[in-house]
Image (tube, rainbow, N blue to C red):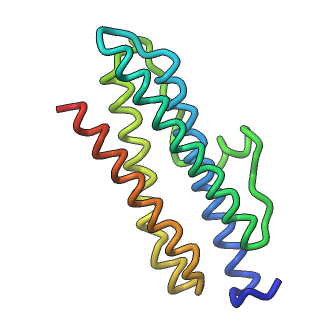
């Protein structure tokens, strides 16, 4: 493969993107958990909100996996691998209240935002991959908007 990025840099980028894919998958699963299990007087609204957010995350999952493939590596796809790579933990809520789900999901989005910010300049400058730098910049914007929406529910 000759796309102007060294093999070593592509391998490093692939690992970082695989960690991102794992984070996105764990957050997707936590969001589906909230969608399926939320209870309370605001059930319908939050059920719909969490479903919409899960759909957005499903699209992000595909985009991240395809970026990994674009730079020449297989995308991880095993749950065990995701759990080994992720920075997140699966959210566990016994009360099924929307505010608890929202707080947990907000934490997940903010964790991903910080991880992405740490890597933007590395991808673009150190690893000479402007495409991945630009790609994750767009993901920062998507996660920031979702975090803002979730934060607004907690006020």
Residue 36, horizontal then vertical, whole percent: 52, 18
Q: Nearer the viewer, residue 151 or 44?
A: 44
Residue 54, horizontal then vertical, whole percent: 52, 36
Q: Nearer the viewer, residue 85 or 20?
A: 20
The quarter of the picture where the N terminus appears is bottom right
Task: Tell me what residue is drawn at x 73 percent, y 45 percent.
Answer: 81
The quarter of the picture where the C terminus appears is top left
Q: Is residue 100 above or below residue 70?
A: above
Task: Tell me what residue is drawn at x 31 percent, y 15 percent.
Answer: 42
Task: Tell me what residue is drawn at x 61 percent, y 55 percent.
Answer: 19
In the figure, is residue 84 to the left or right of 33? right
Residue 121, horizontal then vertical, whole percent: 46, 78
In the figure, is residue 80 to the left or right of 55? right
Location of residue 29 (image quadrant):
top right
Residue 122, horizontal then vertical, whole percent: 51, 78
Q: Nearer the viewer, residue 74 or 126?
A: 74
Q: Is residue 45 above or below residue 22?
A: above
Q: Is residue 78 above or below residue 116?
A: above
Work out which residue is located at the far left of the displayed protein and give it: 155
Work out which residue is located at the far right of the displayed protein and give it: 1
Task: Tell me what residue is drawn at x 73 percent, y 70 percent.
Answer: 70
**Number of callouts:** 0
């Amino acid at each position: 493969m000759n796309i102007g990025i060294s093999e070593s840099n592509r391998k490093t980028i692939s690992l970082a993107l695989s960690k991102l894919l794992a984070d996105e998958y764990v957050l997707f699963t936590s969001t589906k958990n909230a969608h399926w299990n939320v209870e309370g007087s605001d059930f319908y609204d939050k059920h719909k909100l969490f479903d919409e957010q899960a759909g957005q995350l499903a699209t992000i999952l595909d985009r991240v996996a395809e970026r990994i493939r674009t730079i020449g590596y297989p995308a991880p796809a095993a749950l065990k691998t995701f759990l080994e790579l992720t920075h997140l933990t699966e959210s566990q809520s016994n009360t099924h209240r929307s505010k608890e789900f929202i707080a947990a999901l907000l934490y997940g989005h903010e964790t991903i935002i910080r991880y992405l910010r740490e890597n933007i300049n590395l991808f673009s400058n150190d690893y000479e991959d402007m495409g991945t730098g630009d790609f994750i910049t767009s993901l920062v914007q998507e996660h920031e908007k979702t975090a803002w929406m979730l934060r607004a529910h907690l006020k």
